Image (spheres, helix red, strand yellow):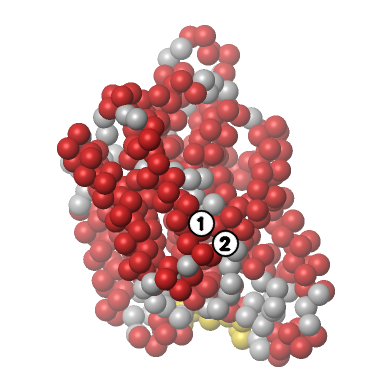
Amino acid sequence: MHADIGQHLSPWWVTFFVVMLLCIAVLPLAAHKWWHPNKNKLIVSAVLGLPVVGMFLYMDYHAVLHIGQEYTSFIILLGALFIISGGIFLETDLRATPLANTGFLALGSVLASFMGTTGAAMLLIRPVLETNKQRTKKVHTIVFFTFLVANIGGCLTPLGDPPLFMGYLKGVPFEWTFKLIPEWAAVVGVLLLVYFVLDTVLYTREPMAAIEADRLEVKPTRILGHWHNVPLLCGVVLSVAFLNENYLPFSAFPLREGVLIGLAAISMIITPKHVRRANHFTFYPILEVAALFAGIFATMIPAILILNARGGELGVQTPMMFFWATGSLSAFLDNTPTYVVFYALAENLGRNPEMAHLGATVARTGVHEVILTGISLGAVFLGAMTYIGNAPNFMVKSIAEERGLKMPSFFGYMLWSIGILVPVFIAATLIFL
């Protein structure tokens, strides 16, 4: 997308994006029955997104082509992970004790960095829901699952979250993100501790009938269905890692997307139907994400262009400022283009001799290491602040609601994230940045 257009673009064009966010936040409460069918979500996306797309087709069709390609890649990757992980039925019904639930969150926080936040979230959300089905107090478990498995856990490798993968494509060494282990361990550790204490308190308030039912309905953990979905899932991860311009002498689009569609199709064909039925698998969650993010991607075009053109005017120059600026925008915009914008600002900062006091730069990038740390952590961590901060957030919410669990509203979820995450993030920035 051409940044120079953003210099002359009226901020009023961002209104479409703001209204899109308000619809996502308000309509589930004000018109729940009308909002539930995905076709109505698509109508809202079309009404708000088409005027923006039409304007840019006239002004700069490259912007539309670029965002269209990003959206296509985004949905195909999520769809492949959703379909393949939906064919892996991890049968388990442990006792839903605070220790067992904390173990699930810890496992997911590790897996997220190596199979992606979407892959880890889709693999574990159903077992977590099944384990906790007898408990009456379980919304907090899914909220913390969203925090940790769908977001924060994914910061250790470029495979964990799309923004980090963009950094890898721009020259950040694959192993560089392992340097974020102290920040990852501190934040994940604190949140696991907070969750364990909270779940322990709520567990003592469960009705005795729920505790007894949970004790009696215990199943051993085993994987049902064909094991072929495990290598297919690995195939998705490897496709994202290696089918890109770093390894191919041509654009990876649409080869990579074709491979992902093929892997998902194989999973659909050879996974027995009873496995997906046991997994309560439906296409509703991925279709909901596709419908809503079509509007988000379309309406955010002006916001991204303005940010590209005028981001330097924000005066962001310190690691802490990069963390909060990248993170705040990542919570509402797609965190991948937000990462790219602030990465470009960091490159310019790295070329400024007056900023030499920031220390060493990352090999092959020219970006100060402390600045890249702030950008990376901000993009990944603060994606947990809203349902739209990272795609798995909405998928987790949708699957939980399909299973009959009433999840917090858009603003209700933000009360959780502001109350729990913001103090942890403030402490993390004071210690590490």
Is residue 86 found left or right of 265 in the rendered image? right
Please indicate, yes or no, whether residue 98 appears anywhere in the rendered image: yes
Q: Which element carries disc 1, helix, strand or loop?
A: helix
In the image, residue 396 sits, relative to residue 132, either above or below, namely: above
Give me the residue at 61% from left, 45% from top. Answer: 184
First along the sequence among labels 2 and 1 = 1
Is residue 321 found left or right of 80 in the rendered image? right
Q: Which element carries disc 2, helix, strand or loop?
A: loop
Give me the residue at 70% from left, 57% from top. Answer: 192
Q: Amino acid at mark 2?
A: Ser
**Front residue of 117 and 303:** 303
In the image, residue 419 sits, relative to residue 58, either above or below, namely: below
Q: Are marks 2 and 1 in contact (CB under 8 Å)?
A: yes
Instruction: Tell me the crowding category of disc 2: few under 14, some 14 to 19, or many 20 or more residues within 10 angstroms, Cα based.
Output: some
Please indicate, yes or no, whether residue 84 appears anywhere in the rendered image: no
In the image, residue 305 sits, relative to residue 41, either above or below, namely: above
Q: Specify the label residue 25 is tagged with.
A: 1
Where does the image place residue 282, in percent across and percent down from the top left?
39, 77
Where does the image place residue 199, in percent across and percent down from the top left?
74, 66
Give me the residue at 30% from left, 55% from top. Answer: 47
| Separation (CA) of disc 2 from disc 1 | 7 Å
**Front residue of 180 and 315:** 315
